[in-house]
Amino acid sequence: MYTNPKSTKQEIKLWAFYLVDIGIVVGMLMIATYVKKVIPLGPGMTMFYYILSAAFGMFLCAKTPSHPTDRNYNILFYLFKMDRNKYHAIEIKDFGLEERTEKR
């Protein structure tokens, strides 16, 4: 029996897959079907194209190690939305540097 989610931000899981992930992979396969109608491909290339589209859909669903809450499609969206004319400083914390400067 299904229970109500605790919040609206909670990801819904069907069997072993999240609903968003299933939707993205199905969407990629639907786009592949449309492109297959526009571009004529042989049967071997059609099967390869479907496998490649499903693999790309799974890549978009994967979570990145640096942002475990965001998926790759969110990271790509942030990348394209980013202001290219604004400088973003990267702060690097080197904990060993303080000890080396104090010993001198």
Image (cartoon, rainbow, N blue to C red):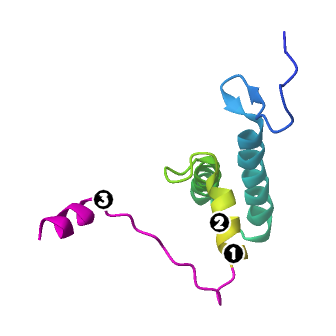
Residues packed near mark 2 inside 10 Å, few (<14), some (14 to 19) or many (20 plus): few
Q: Do the residues labelled 1 and 2 touch (CB within 8 Å)?
A: yes
**Element class at badge 3:** helix
Measured along the vertical axis of the image, is residue 80 above or below residue 69? below
Q: Could you say which is closer to the camera, residue 90 or residue 4?
A: 90
Q: Are marks 1 and 3 in contact (CB under 8 Å)?
A: no
Magenta segment: does it hold 90? Answer: yes
| Label 1 Cα neighbours within 10 Å, binned few <14 / some 14-19 / many ≥20 | few
| Residue 95, numbered label | 3
Q: What stretch is highlighted in magenta?
A: 83-104
Q: Which mark is residue 76?
A: 2
Marked residue nearer the N-terminal end (1 or 3): 1
- Which residue position is annotated with label 1? 80
The image quadrant that residue 87 belongs to is bottom right
Where does the image place residue 63, in percent across and percent down from the top left? 58, 47
Name the element at disc 1.
helix
Q: In this view, does 91 lie to the left or right of 29?
A: left
Tell me the amino acid under the disc marked 2: Leu
Q: Which residue is drawn at 77% across and 36% down?
A: 19
Looking at the rendering, in which quadrant would you find the N terminus? Answer: top right
State the image coordinates of residue 90 (x, y, percent, origin top left): 48, 73
- Taking the image as shown, residue 50 lies to the left or right of residue 92, namely right
Q: In this view, does 2 lie above or below 44?
A: above
